[in-house]
Image: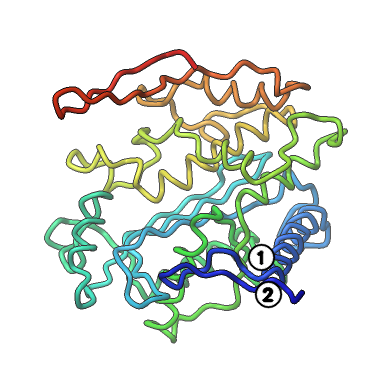
């Protein structure tokens, strides 16, 4: 019997990849995780401290307006945060990007994204008094920040991004590189933020027997995606702090990178037993911050030697009933 072939659905979409493709993906993942581990342990980086908890990391997010080609996205906003476990958040930068153009047939997508994310419409920045970073300067700005704070691996710019956002980030960078070839930056490498959190947690003393060590990316994402600081306007850019845009703070690129950095620091400081300094490891408190109970509960579950025995939080079960052609929803708090 021959090797199993990839399976496609009726739309031509890949459903089950070839076994070799799965093996290649796994090998790529192992190699990437090994790169993060080696980076943390290296003591010969001239621009970085020797201790892993003192090393600085760069998290990058780009919010797009719309697609320009099948593999390109036009960026609308980008944000960078530099942080370390010891010093917390050390640098952040955000910029709105006025592309000045809307591809044919994409106006509806641009309008939708502008309304959802409270973004100024391309070409209307002056009319709404929105400061922007020229598209030709975006990559240069990111590279300068990476160089200043030592976020490099050899000759590559080292970027950490959420796994689910790597495709978006790469597509935005591809558009910037093609549109402004004279501003094309040097080689870069994107690794997952989840990998970084996993690798850092493995450096704690007696990691093999420590239940708080993160063993998979899903556990890391649970901390990084926590919504604690989503509505904290102090973490948003000036544009999203305006009265008309304050309700869309969770979609601000600066809020996104900062809240993820603070969520990561909350976990890592507790794991390594380090003090959390205001404004460095913990942002300015706001009445809209989500109560910390849920994040503490997640950490306690990880610390529990038998997490299976932890009582699950009850969630309402939804039942649908039909009465005279009208759907009625009933909630049952029992599991």
Quarter of the image where one finds residue 108: bottom left
Asked if the residue under mark 2 is in contact with the one under mark 1, i.e. CB atoms within 8 Å, the reply is yes
Q: Secondary structure at mark 2?
A: loop
Q: Is residue 57 left or right of residue 70?
A: right
Residue positioned 60% across, 31% down in the render: 266
Q: Secondary structure at mark 1?
A: strand
Quarter of the image where one finds residue 111: bottom left
The spot of residue 38 in percent (x, y) is 80, 58
Please tell me which residue lies in front, 68 or 161: 68
The spot of residue 104 in percent (x, y) is 20, 78
Q: Residue furthest left?
A: 127
Name the quadrant of the N terminus.
Answer: bottom right
Distance Cα–Cα, label 1 vs label 2: 7 Å
Q: Is residue 279 left or right of residue 321?
A: right
Structural crowding at the residue carrying mark 1, measured as other residues with C-alpha within 10 Å and reported as few (<14), some (14–19) or many (≥20): many
The spot of residue 146 in percent (x, y) is 58, 63
Q: Residue furthest bottom?
A: 182
Instruction: Name the residue beneath numbered marker 2.
Output: 155
Instruction: Name the residue beneath numbered marker 1.
Output: 152
Q: Is residue 223 above or below residue 14?
A: above
Q: Is residue 112 above or below residue 72?
A: above
Please tell me which residue lies in front, 37 or 58: 37
The spot of residue 49 in percent (x, y) is 75, 52
Q: Residue furthest front?
A: 1
Q: Is residue 275 left or right of residue 139?
A: right
Residue positioned 39% across, 74% down in the render: 72
Colour theme: rainbow
Structural crowding at the residue carrying mark 2, measured as other residues with C-alpha within 10 Å and reported as few (<14), some (14–19) or many (≥20): few
Residue positioned 54% across, 53% down in the render: 162
């Amino acid at each position: 019997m021959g090797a199993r072939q990839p399976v496609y659905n009726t739309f031509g979409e890949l459903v089950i990849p070839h076994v070799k493709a799965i093996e290649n993906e796994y090998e790529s993942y192992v190699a990437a995780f090994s790169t993060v581990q080696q980076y943390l342990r290296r003591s010969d980086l001239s621009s970085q401290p020797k201790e892993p908890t003192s090393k600085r990391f760069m998290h990058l997010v780009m919010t797009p307006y719309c697609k320009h080609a099948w593999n390109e996205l036009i960026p609308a906003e980008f944000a960078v945060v530099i942080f370390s476990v010891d010093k917390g958040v050390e640098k952040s930068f955000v910029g709105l990007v006025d592309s000045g153009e809307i591809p044919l047939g994409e106006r509806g997508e641009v309008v939708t994204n502008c309304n959802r994310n409270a973004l100024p419409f391309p070409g209307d920045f002056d009319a709404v008094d929105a400061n922007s970073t020229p598209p030709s300067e975006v990559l240069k700005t990111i590279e300068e920040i990476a160089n200043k704070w030592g976020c490099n691996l050899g000759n590559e710019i080292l970027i950490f991004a959420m796994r689910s956002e790597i495709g978006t980030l790469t597509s935005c960078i591809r558009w910037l590189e093609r549109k402004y070839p004279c501003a094309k930056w040097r080689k870069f490498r994107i690794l997952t933020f989840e990998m970084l959190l996993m690798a850092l947690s493995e450096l704690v003393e007696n990691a093999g027997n420590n239940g708080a060590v993160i063993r998979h990316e899903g556990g890391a994402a649970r901390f990084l995606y926590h919504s604690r600081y989503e509505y904290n306007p102090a973490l948003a850019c000036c544009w999203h702090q305006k009265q008309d845009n304050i309700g869309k703070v969770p979609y601000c690129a600066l809020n996104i990178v900062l809240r993820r950095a603070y969520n990561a620091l909350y976990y890592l400081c507790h794991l390594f037993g380090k003090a959390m300094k205001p404004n460095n490891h913990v942002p300015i408190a706001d009445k809209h911050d989500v109560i910390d109970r849920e994040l503490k509960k997640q950490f306690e579950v990880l610390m529990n030697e038998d997490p299976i025995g932890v009582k699950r939080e009850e969630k309402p079960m939804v039942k649908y009933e039909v009465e005279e052609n009208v759907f009625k929803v009933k909630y049952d708090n029992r599991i």
